[in-house]
Image (cartoon, helix red, strand yellow):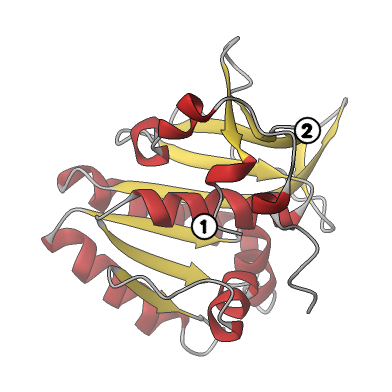
Amino acid sequence: MILDNVLFKNHDNAMPKNNNDLNLESILSQTKINSILYSDPFLKAGFISKLMQDTKTDVLYLDFDLLYSGYLASGILTTPKNLTLFQPTYESWNETLTKVLDTLSLRKSIVIVDSLNGLYNIMNKRKEIGKHVISYLMLLASVAKNTGSHVVVASMVRFKKEEGWVLLPTGNRIIETDKVKKMLLEQNESGIVVDFLNKKDKIVIQASSIPL
């Protein structure tokens, strides 16, 4: 696994420092699933590392693609004290989900599902995978609502004119519902651009504020 393809803090073209005050927890919805869309996994890693830096809320991290775990294991990122990290497999999934739901029902937390592609992958032994995956996400969102928590789901995607946003490489469609807040991650010379898609709003996470 290559961990140094993106080092945002070394970019020379960051925007003015007064934009570094952006706290990513403040843009998350408590009433909707926060869907983080990306085509480059290192943009997702940059976004999540900034979110982890910004929040003091307990984080329940379901790491399916192990990229974030790799940053922690290598020492590139320091393990936050508020982090509970899970690395689910098909065999451990039911137990892991139960632990997350139990914790989520007791206190405000941020649940990060990283990534939806990985969740689909570990469910490949089951029939009607899509229905299972959607039911898991809706269950997390329902329990999270009771404690004022956030659910963040990262998905590696591309846009197809005929189908909309689909997962890479499987082609499964992402959830399209008014209960999802979509945020597309792109990169420019200043850092990571967060495009809210259904609005005209965009924000920039400056390179100098990202801990990678």
Query: How far across and how far down the image is residue 141, in percent?
Result: 34, 47
Tag in front: 1 or 2? 2
Query: How far across and how far down the image is residue 66, in percent?
Result: 62, 76
In the image, residue 94 sits, relative to residue 118, either above or below, namely: below
Q: Amino acid at mark 1?
A: Ser
Q: Secondary structure at mark 2?
A: loop
Q: Residue at x 67, y 34 (%)?
A: 14
Position of residue 205 in the picture relative to residue 86 (left or right): right
Q: Which residue is mark 2?
A: 189
In the image, residue 163 sits, relative to residue 38, either above or below, namely: above
Query: How far across and how far down the image is residue 164, in percent?
Result: 77, 30
In the image, residue 81 sits, relative to residue 12, either above or below, namely: below
Query: How far across and how far down the image is residue 125, in percent?
Result: 67, 79
Q: Which residue is mark 1?
A: 49
Task: Report the front residue among 188 and 199.
Answer: 188
Q: Residue at x 59, y 72 (%)?
A: 64
Question: Where is residue 56, by image quadrant?
Answer: bottom left
Task: Report the front residue among 151 and 137.
Answer: 151
- Pointer 1 local density, CA inside 10 Å: few below 14, some 14–19, many at least 20: some
Q: Amino acid at mark 2?
A: Glu
Quadrant of the drawing holding the C terminus: bottom right
Quadrant of the drawing holding the N terminus: bottom right
Q: Secondary structure at mark 1?
A: helix
- Looking at marks 1 and 2 on the same chain, the residue that comes earlier in the sequence is marked by 1
Q: CA distance from mark 1 to mark 2?
A: 19 Å
Q: Which residue, as the protein is rendered here, is positioned at the far top?
A: 200
Q: Which mark is residue 6?
A: none
